[in-house]
Amino acid sequence: MVIADTSVWIEFLKNNEPIFSFFEDRLNNREILGIECVFGELLQGCANENEIKIVKEYWENLPKTDETTVWIEAGEYSGRNNLISRGVGLIDSVILVLAKRTKSKIWTLDKKLLKLLDKEIVFKI
């Protein structure tokens, strides 16, 4: 499975290549994991009802994982690893924790987050 962060989703939703084609293939193969906080960020940035509808349709159709206690675990993980001082916020910490839980790769365009990730966990196109 692949966890795409908000930056990747935005590029996909804008139909920006090469992200769009690679992302679409992963979606069609049901390899993209729906993460609640990522979709919260996407919905926060929607400009109109049509965009909200599109984002919600993706959310409803993606595979998901149990996110119980993930915010607590992410806070602890962030604190132990001093992530906030490295420019990595709580949502990125949630993504990290969920990737470890589900043994998923992380697809991000965030340079600060990429610096933290082991090469084995990074999804590259």
Image: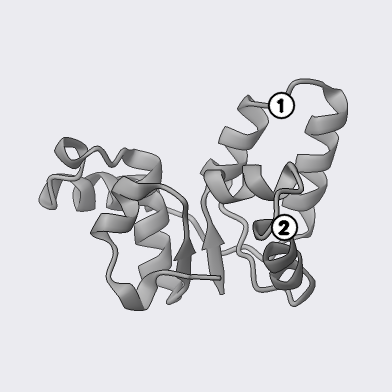
Whole-percent x, y for residue 110 in the image: 40, 47
Query: Which quadrant holds residue 41?
Result: top right
- Determine the CA span between mark 2 and mark 1: 18 Å
Q: Is residue 86 visible?
A: yes
Q: Nearer the viewer, mark 2 or mark 1?
A: 2
Q: Amino acid at mark 1?
A: Cys
- Can residue 69 be seen here? no
Q: Which residue is mark 2?
A: 20
In front: 31, or 109?
A: 109
Q: Front-most of 125 and 107?
A: 125
Local packing at callout 1 (Cα closer than 10 Å; few below 14, some 14-19, many 20+) is some
The front one of 120 and 60 is 120
- State whether residue 30 is above or below residue 94: below
Secondary structure at badge 2 equals helix
Q: State the residue position of label 1.
A: 46
Residue kind at label 2, given as amino acid type? Phe
Kindly identify the residue that appears in the image at 35 percent across and 60 percent down: 97
Does residue 115 sit above or below 55 in this rendering?
below
Count every numbered label the image shows and give the total: 2
Residue positioned most to the right: 50
- Which circle's residue, 2 or 1, is located before the other in the chain? 2
Does 98 sit left or right of 60 as displayed? left
Quarter of the image containing the N terminus? bottom right
Residue in the image at 42% along x and 66% along y = 99
Image coordinates for residue 10, horizontal then vertical, percent: 64, 42
Seen as rendered, the residue at the extreme front is 17
Quadrant (top left, top right, bottom left, bottom right) of the C terminus: bottom right
Residue 76 appears left or right of 49? left
